[in-house]
Image (cartoon, rainbow, N blue to C red):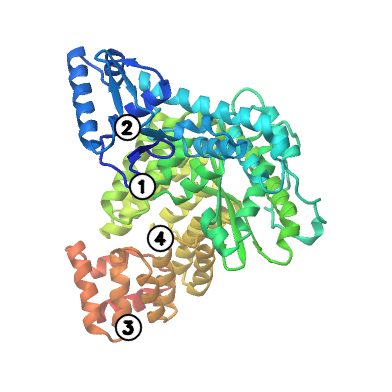
Amino acid sequence: MGLALTTFGTCRLEDDGGHALRVPLISLVMLAYLYDRGQPISRRELATLFWQGSRETAYTNLRSTLRRLAMATAETLAPLIESDGQTLSVNRATLRCDLSLVELADPIDRLRAANDAVAMQFLPSMGHGTTQLDSWVRDVRTRLAGFLRSELMQHHASLNTSAWRGELRRAAILLLECDPADDEVRTLLTSGLDARRPEPAAASIRVDATPQPLAFKDPNFGVAEQPPLRLALLPPETVQSARRDGSVANALIEDLTISLCANRTVSIVAPYTAERIQASKDKAAVLQQYNVVYALDTKRTEDSLFVQLIFMPADEVVWATRFKLDANAIVEQRTVISTAIQRSIIDKISVSTEIAGDFRQRPEAYYAYLHGLTGLSTLTLPSIRKARKYFKQALEDERGFAPALAGTARTLSMEWLLTARGDNELLLHAERLAQTAITKHGPSAGALKELGVSQLYLGKIDESLEALSEAEAISPHYADALYSHADSLVHASNPAAALAKITSAIALNPIPPDTYFWTAAGASYFLGEYQQALGYIDRMRDSRPASRLAAASWGMLGEVTKARACRLRVLKDNPSFDLNLWLEMIPHKENWQTELYRDGLLRAGF
């Protein structure tokens, strides 16, 4: 009975049946180290490599680890680690390891295995520190990338057929992710490996551009003092689902990836990594790990593909477009579409390169800001206050950091709304922070949005609408700006326009935060569509913050029992809630709105 050690993408030990053995992780890493070294290693070297501190403690830990490994693998025909008393070595007759890809005879198998090794990464949870063990992990990754490059250069001509061109292109993209300055690989990708059809007539497809004219002219833009900006193209689907559904959307993103790899302005995150980012539950952490500055987010809905370019440090949509995936034409038009998108992306990135450079020089502020954004995804006081701590940390790392100023303003406005205590100091502070962000760094959609939100709750409805209109003009595809604009329109006594705008925001952000549905519910309520309002509230992941609105809606529908159940939730979360004080706090341009809200809340028993 033999065992298999997997080190790419994970670290696990499996039996012949593919079942994972419960073995301490450190013993698996030790197996990988011994396998990679390929020769006996002294006990002293292993002990000091894996454990810091006194020699006695290190030896004790080594003996314990070896004993636990032997007990977990006792059913194997021979021990995995052999010892002569002074040295240790791995028993290759008993253990197989994916590090043996060099031994594969077929060049196609070697290329595919090398692609997987680099894409999935050797021991991905390690290699980020400064210990000798971390240095060894990084060295293995470097050697694997070198092996992949050697295979690509040696066999690209013989394997450059329609059946294997995909693996060759995959190898080139992975290598450019490792080293964006590798001109030989870039040339190979964009010429010898890109054997697609001639480009069809550009008039056959239209990709909506931004109102600003294209400004990018210099094909060598961005080469020089610092490495290019990281861009991740997030696919709309996993590779498996795309193949199952016969979707061409992912193929289009692959074309775009190849096109962008030819440009020195950006460094492209390889597709496997991009798919991991898209599927991650904590995107901020993965983005931090891969230093992504721009993300091209994509969503496929039935017969169309929505594409938006997000400037991650400011969480701001700087460009977006939507087009139909016509099965009869898309294959012929893929090159045209990818070229049009590429030009728009490079234009937008070139415009904001100076700002992006600031983020790269001050990564601590950037990453603290990203963690703050993650906290804003939940509408609870603890999460909002935690987000504020991260924004303050970002400001400590970089004073005047505009996105963190705007983020802090957002937490203050949200706290005012959730506590319902009428503390206008929160709103005044939020307004000052947003104005400071605009003064220091010029108008941005994010800062103008927060200015408009704080002004709305301060009762400055016209000023709020003006700020939010300007934010939308700067970034017409910025869903959060549209949502805030819709919210102000509700309070400006124009619920029909508000519902149309929030519907557009949801279309831009199909899996939106709860605040979008809350605003849609408010617009519906003031249109007299109480059941529709409740439908939007039901779509919230956590509907408790909207319990007041739900109570009023049930009250207007005559469902007293349900209305009072919502009232009890409100009072449980905020025992000091005062109806008259709340209605005085909430700004409405026309009095009929206040009275309609009052009527619903009174019917609910407030």
- Sequence-wise first label, 4 or 1: 1
**Which disc is residue 28 wearing?**
2
Q: From the viewer's perspective, tell me whether residue 355 is left or right of residue 281.
A: right
- Sequence-wise first label, 3 or 2: 2
Q: Quadrant of the C terminus?
A: bottom left
Q: Is residue 248 above or below residue 272?
A: below
Q: Please state which of residues 101 and 419 is positioned toward the viewer in this rendering.
A: 101
Residue that numbered label 3 is attached to: 556
Q: From the viewer's perspective, tell me whether residue 273 is left or right of residue 79.
A: right
Task: Please state which of the two labelled residues, at mark 3 or mark 1, is closer to the viewer.
Answer: 1
Horizontal and vertical percent for residue 465?
51, 60
Q: Secondary structure at mark 4?
A: loop
- Sequence-wise first label, 3 or 1: 1
Amino acid type at image mark 3: Met
Q: Secondary structure at mark 1?
A: loop
Residue that numbered label 1 is attached to: 18
Cα distance, mark 3 to mark 1?
60 Å
Which residue corresponds to the image point at 47% horizontal and 31% vertical from the top-left? 100
Task: Please state which of the two labelled residues, at mark 4 or mark 2, is closer to the viewer.
Answer: 2
Does the CB distance between marks 4 and 3 fall below 8 Å? no
Q: Please state which of residues 412 and 439 is positioned toward the viewer in this rendering.
A: 412
Which residue corresponds to the image point at 67% horizontal and 43% vertical from the top-left? 258
Instruction: Sort mark 3 into few (<14), some (14-19) or many (20+) by Cα contacts within 10 Å.
Output: many
Horizontal and vertical percent for residue 286?
43, 41
Q: Is residue 255 above or below residue 526?
A: above
Cα distance, mark 1 to mark 2?
16 Å
Residue that numbered label 4 is attached to: 459
